[in-house]
Amino acid sequence: MEKILVIGCSGQIGSELTLELRKMYGDSNVVATDIRPAPADILESGPFEILDVLDAGKLQLVCEHEKITQVYHLAAILSGNAEKRPMPSWEINMRSLFNVLEIAKALKLKKIFWPSSIAVFGPTTPRMNTPQYTTMEPNTVYGISKLAGERWIEYYYQKYGIETRSLRYPGLISYKTEAGGGTTDYAVEIFYDAIKTGKYECFLSSETALPMMFMPDAIKATIDVMEAESFKLSLRSSYNVAGICFTPHTLANEIKKQIPDFEISYKPDFRQAIADSWPDCIDDSVAQKDWGLTYEYDLPRMTQVMIDEIRRK
Ligand code: NAD
Ligand code: AKB
């Protein structure tokens, strides 16, 4: 019997992944936690606890009391917010990971999921079809913490046999919960503003290409890599997952097909430099080969669902 702990259940990914895990493992077998209250559907469907992942003592007590076997550790400070508060963000991103890994070692937990990001790449990385193995010199606090985290999860696998699993998510696009302070957030905000006001002022320039992924594809990839048999995984750092690559200009044109009067303007801010250091699109052939990564959503299909669902909200 698996018993799962989700850390950061109230965020953009956690608010959807928790419900999907409850469908798979049973509502009472997925314990949702966050430092802030959870959305109503998480509170109503199963156990929830307020938990600061930096409190290692409480984290261990929850894992022991609930007889946890797997952890999905989603709490982090994302790229844009981390640049505003470098040291506290480093502390949250790194110490939380060590707390989870040390408890996994002490309690012999079966599996840990910890997400990495395209932020592990930097200005010296090839931007087009960025390979799985390449130059990685991130120049953001967030990117440095993700690259260090990748090294540490591989270390805990090799030294202590902990089944660590990870994906380098691109920017994630979803309609349930707002994005949490990243550089790719424009691709979520644009839909809300297009529907509410018919206009959007983008904080990246029109031709800034970035890899993105629609949330249902990200949730499926997360569960697939966690469910994959151990021998199929050829790497224990983190898998490239590519999704869809587009610029703000391309996305705006796609939205105009549904909302013809939609207008976009551009006022790049500090996040432009972050985006400029990240790939345009990445190569995820290793994930395809090892555990069969696939996608359902291309740009037109994702745009249609985003507009329909946000209108419904
Ligand atoms: P988010 O900011 O929406 O959610 C993170 C959650 O963690 C929040 O609900 C927050 O309250 C919680 N949290 C923060 N500090 C905490 C603490 N000390 N203790 C407990 N909970 C705490 O982030 P997200 O978009 O859901 O991202 C989840 C993970 O995926 C992060 O590691 C992030 O780096 C990674 N990721 C996200 C994206 C994306 O586009 N959303 C892309 C790449 C990687
Ligand atoms: C961010 O923009 O910080 C995140 C990410 C790509 O890691 N969405």
Image (tube, grey):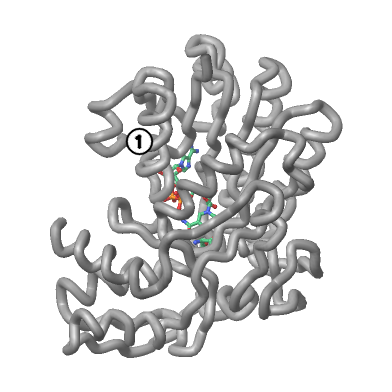
Name the spot of residue 215 as percent of width and height, x first: 41, 55
Q: Which of 149/216 is in front?
A: 216
The number of discs equals 1
Q: Residue furthest right?
A: 159
How packed mark 1 is, by other alpha carbons closer than 10 Å (few <14, some 14-19, many 20 or more), is some
The answer to whether 258 is drawn above or below residue 296 in the figure is below
User: In terms of secondary structure, where does tag 1 sit?
Assistant: helix
Residue 228, compared with residue 148, is above or below; it is: above
Q: Is residue 188 left or right of residue 172?
A: left
Residue 189 coordinates in the image, percent (x, y) = 32, 69
> Where, quadrant-wise, is the C terminus in this rendering?
bottom left
Residue 127 can be seen in this image: yes
Which residue is found at the position 74% from the left and 75% from the top? 125
Residue 9: x and y, percent?
40, 38
Which residue in the structure is indicated by mark 1? 19
Q: Is residue 87 visible?
A: no
Nearer to us in this view, 88 or 127: 127
Q: Is residue 182 left or right of residue 265?
A: right
Comparing 260 with 35, the one in front is 260
Q: Nearer the viewer, residue 290 or 164?
A: 290
* Residue 66 to residue 166: above or below: above
Which quarter of the figure has residue 31?
top left
Q: Is mark 1 within 8 Å of ligand 1?
A: no
Q: Is residue 160 above or below residue 115?
A: above
Q: Is residue 186 left or right of residue 287?
A: left
The structure residue drawn at horizontal position 18% and vertical position 73%, both measured from the top left corner, is 195
The residue that appears at 58% across and 35% down in the rendered structure is 227
Residue type marked 1: Leu
- Residue 244 lies, in percent from the top left, at 50, 70
Question: Residue at image x 60%, y 42%?
Answer: 225
State which quadrant residue 161 falls in: top right
